[in-house]
Image (cartoon, rainbow, N blue to C red):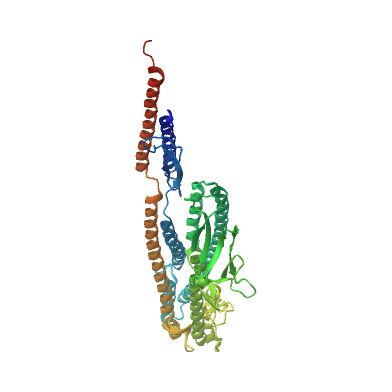
Amino acid sequence: MRSTFHGLETARRGMFTQQTALQTTGHNIANANTPGYSRQRVNFVQTEAYPAASMNRPQIPGQMGTGVAAGSVQRVREGFLDTQFRGENNKLGYWDARSEALEKMEDIMNEPSDNGLAKTLDRFWQSLQDLSVNPEDSGARSVVRQRGLAVAETFNYLSNSLTAIQGDLKSQANITTKEINALLDDIQSINKQISEVEPHGYLPNTLYDERDSLVDRLSTLLNVEVTTKPSGGKPDPLAAGLYDIKMKDKDGTEFTLVDSTNGTVNHLVINYNDGTGGNGLADSVVVGGGIPITISKFAGGKLQGLIESYGYNDNGSVKGIYPDMLTNLDQMAYQFATEFNKVHSAGWSLSEIEAGAPAGYNFFDLGGVSDPVNPKGAAKLLKLHDDMKELDNIAAATNQFAGDGSNALRLGDVKNAPLDFPGSKSSLQSFYEGAIGKMAVDAQQAVRLTNNSAVLTDSVQQRRLSVSGVSLDEEMTNMIQFQHAYNASARNITVIDEMLDKIINGLGVGGR
């Protein structure tokens, strides 16, 4: 026989379950603006019907429902969208770092403008034209010397500024590496907490959200792949399990960063060529003290963008955005100063004409840089030669005539003279225009791909939020629905109470 109070228990279960749903709805509303929060829902399940199938079951028409229970509180999340988001986020991190580095370079090079190297060189060539007309004029000579000084100082400024930014990029790469290692430690720490909760059948939704937020952040910095493992014990079928984090290089070789089975974390270290005679650039990245990954095979994320901007060694050659531009400036400064000195020392200055003997004065000083193949530091060290302390030492003539300004014209022709740059012969102006043009094209590509990656990342993020984000409209509707269900269960108790009152107090009163 079924219990007289069967209906009361069914209604009580309904109230408790709707109350749980209302509390979860309140939790969702409270976290509507919490970054990384995934909305939660209560999975309603029917309680076991009465009576259970057995030989001694009561003879009633059929099984009766006994109400509802909150089976689990599950966060609503789509794993495929997480994977898609992290893939796009990784590209965004790479192109954003590269774009930012190129933007800083463009600011320093400042081309085209009235203060760039091209304009400074143009003013220098123009001063030589003026000198060719008035070779004995001290004012024209002073202008040539000052414009030459401006050229040297512009080379110095560009080289020093690019080197300073390059140093900042190295610091950023090191900080990013520390951040990656800290994120890996945090993910493993949460893995450990989850492994202590899940075996008891609970769903630690807050820990899941926190861990996924860390992985999202990690995907900006590094190309990572997440696989899940069961935590053991008797977990809920909806349990997310433990995360193994791996990194892939361009060849597809996997490197384990977080191993949930052993509870170990393999930290990243950037190896720099800082030894004796080294150039200080990045050689490789090592994961957990294992086999070094060459930078050319290192794939994805902000860290790769920073290292490629800072510069790295690849099979004996130097690559990178800033090393390339610094090398171009050194080549320009060396070829320009060498060719200019060659023409200048072949001419006659006023002091040489007066002395009646050539002295071979130099106009520029390369600070001891003499290797035409690798003139490292030429732009940084370029200055006016001590010979130029005397204005009369400027060689404007090709003959021993003070009024001859033909050598000043020859010096001006250095602008268009074919110079021996690596791999080709080119004029100074053409070489510089090529370097600036390449920088501009690279910057445009980086900005374009940054914008494209941002659009795709935002698109996936919106799709992800449409699944896991909190909609206040939806929560308010749910709240009304659960509230009415709660009220109806309470009303059901009232009805049953009236029925029991009739049975207890209203029956058997005949004749009173």
Q: Is residue 453 visible?
A: yes
User: Which of the 4 image quarters holds residue 12?
Assistant: top left
Out of 341 and 98, give the one closest to the viewer. Answer: 98
449 on left or right of 395: left
Q: Does 119 appear above or below 87?
A: below
Q: In this rendered view, identify the residue nearer to me: 215 or 11.
A: 11
Which residue in the rendered view is the most extreme toward the top? Answer: 512
Figure check: 210 above or below 66: below
Q: Quadrant of the N terminus?
A: top left
Q: Could you say which is closer to the camera, residue 65 or residue 301?
A: 65
Q: Which residue occupies the extreme right position in the image?
A: 276
Residue 89, image x, y percentages:
44, 60
Where residue 411 appears, x then y in whole percent?
45, 82
Q: Is residue 20 above or below residue 243?
A: above
Q: Would residue 394 be seen by someone viewing this image from the given angle? A: no
Position of 473 compared to 180: left or right?
A: left
* Vertical placement of residue 262 versus 30, above or below: below
Where residue 506 sits: x, y (%)?
38, 17
Residue closer to the observer: 414 or 507: 507
